Amino acid sequence: MKALDGLEKNADKVLTVKDLEKTYPQWRKEPTKAVDGISFTVDKGEIVGFLGPNGAGKTTTIKCICGLVEPTRGDIKIFGMDAIKNTRRAVSNTSAVLEGNRNIYWRLTTRENLEFFARLHGRSLKEAEPEIKSLLKRFDLKDKEEAPARKLSRGMQQKLALSCALIRGTDFLLLDEPTLGLDVKTSKEMREFVKQLTSDGGKTILLSSHDMNVVEDVCERVIIMNEGKILANDSVNNLKDVFNVHLYDFILEGEPKLPELKEKYSVTDIKYDNGKTKLRVSLKKPDSFYDLVNHLQKKDVKLEEVKNLDKNLEEIFMNVIEKEGVVK
Amino acid sequence: MREHIIFYSVVKKYFIELKRYFLNTLMTMIGIFILFLLVFFGLRNFEAGTDTLQGSIVGFAMWIFAVMAYSEMSWGLLQEARDGTLEQLYLTPSTFRRISAYRVFGSFIFQFLLFVVFLGIMMASTGQYLSLDPGVVLLIGLTLLSIYGLGYIMGGLSLVFKKVQAGNQILQFLFILLLVLPTITDHQIIYFVPLSWGNHMINRMMIDGLSLLDFSLIEYSILLANSFAYLIIGLFIFSLMEKTAKKRGLLGHY
């Protein structure tokens, strides 16, 4: 159903990007193609991660979505509204944190920033006050309420920037590198909070990051980009499956002869050393692990140690980038 | 649409920033005042007439007003880009042009208060007293519309080209020429350039003691046509530059 502002706030698809292309014209140089005909959607309540090396086109895509960069070609719909023809209305239910600790006024205090951005989105102080209090508490900014933003630590500035995006009260959030430059503790806090936003707050989030751990930890789905193209668009778990990454090292006592293992469990390597056997096994399904352990028990082979060599998202990412087009 | 809340937020932020940089604002004012005293007593040493001395007071106050109004548009925009907040101002249910207009409104209020205080100090320190009809606010407001138009042009250019400070300095000197133009020529050019005709009307009001009713419809028409023409051209060029900046992805750059 369309609301008064023309946005379909209850639509399943919060964002639909189709054949998006952005070529930057250059003075006396060849134009640069930053985004090359990409299409994807973001569903209501999802956290989708944009992953890619520098220059992959992540920030340009995010800026095209919020109308700060004009696309060369393609369609963008936010809550069902054409964001290229009606940018202002389409982004009225969207907020963004674009570059870490910028986005806030360094001369204003923490509270003044929050009040300013709430009102900038047409929210009265009376309406926004409970959220201001809750954000100050949630991000441990209460003690710094009256401190100018320039005197806050980088981590606090980034928390404030995120709070300023949230205080606008929009349902869709675009976060460009939200944990960039943060220490481990603050980054963890930020991740937890971002996860809570969708589970408790009903927000939909599109997040870009260089940090694989952030994407792996926070996002349900990941879009891998390189040179303006989407190379992979799937859930983190599916991507792991696609790359068949259940790798284990089994250390066995003695030097048992087990020829059947090679066929049944894809043993890729066997080494004998000091009366011990090391098997490297590549399993198609995680459940096969238990079958293998049972099999070894039946054969009276004593298991000394098992090491899980599963690939993390970083390895998958490198794999996708290297084998461009494999999982399109 | 809660446009009034957005208006309030922008104006309030303008005054908070002024307060936070109170010392800086005060030092600037003192610097300008010293410059004024040099100009005024310099003119008196050349045995300039009362009209010239009074004209220099009005002209100087108008020059400060114009420079501040113009800087607010062009420099203010660049400052937002530098701070990384410019893009945030595009993500509102309002439009960026409206938001910058609200900021200009806030600055007009502040600059007018400053104008009155400055004028008072100038008159007291020089012994030259001028007529202060409240109607002069209307003339100043209308005259400055042309300056805001120029501010939008330079603001738009700074969105795309970033380094336009040299142009700003040239314009500041050009304002002096435009302000004194009616005293050195009665050529029709004063109807077409910004600032000149409006300043001429303000001078007649403050020095000759005229009221708003003493001006003819034609004189008002010239002022309105001149001011709105510059404002509309300014907004048009700003839109064009804004579109170019979005095409080239330059909005957040500095």
Image (spheres, coloured by chain):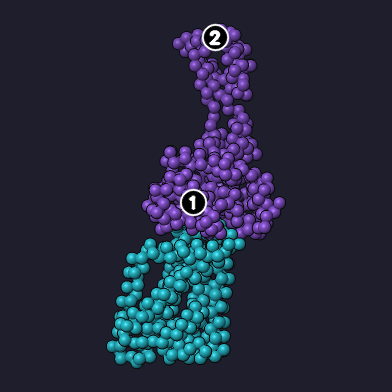
Q: Colour of chain B?
A: cyan
A234 horizontally vs B26: left or right:
right
The three-letter code of the residue at mark 1 reads Ile
Labelled disc at residue A301: 2
The three-letter code of the residue at mark 2 reads Val
Check disc 2 and report its element: helix, strand or loop: loop
Circle 1 crowding by C-alpha within 10 Å: few under 14, some 14–19, many from 20: many
Q: Earlier in the sequence, mark 1 or mark 2?
A: 1
Label 1 marks a residue whose chain is A
Instruction: Kindly identify which residue carries mark 1.
Output: A132
Residue at screen point 51% across, 57% down = A125
Verify CB contact (< 8 Å) between mark 1 and mark 2. no
Q: Residue furthest right?
A: A1
| Label 1 and label 2 in one chain | yes
Q: Is residue A72 visible?
A: no
Residue at screen point 53% across, 83% down = B223
B39 horizontally vs A27: left or right:
left
Location of the C terminus of chain A (image quadrant):
top right
Residue at screen point 43% across, 49% down = A157
Image coordinates of residue B216 in percent, x first then y, are: 54, 90
Q: Colour of chain A?
A: purple
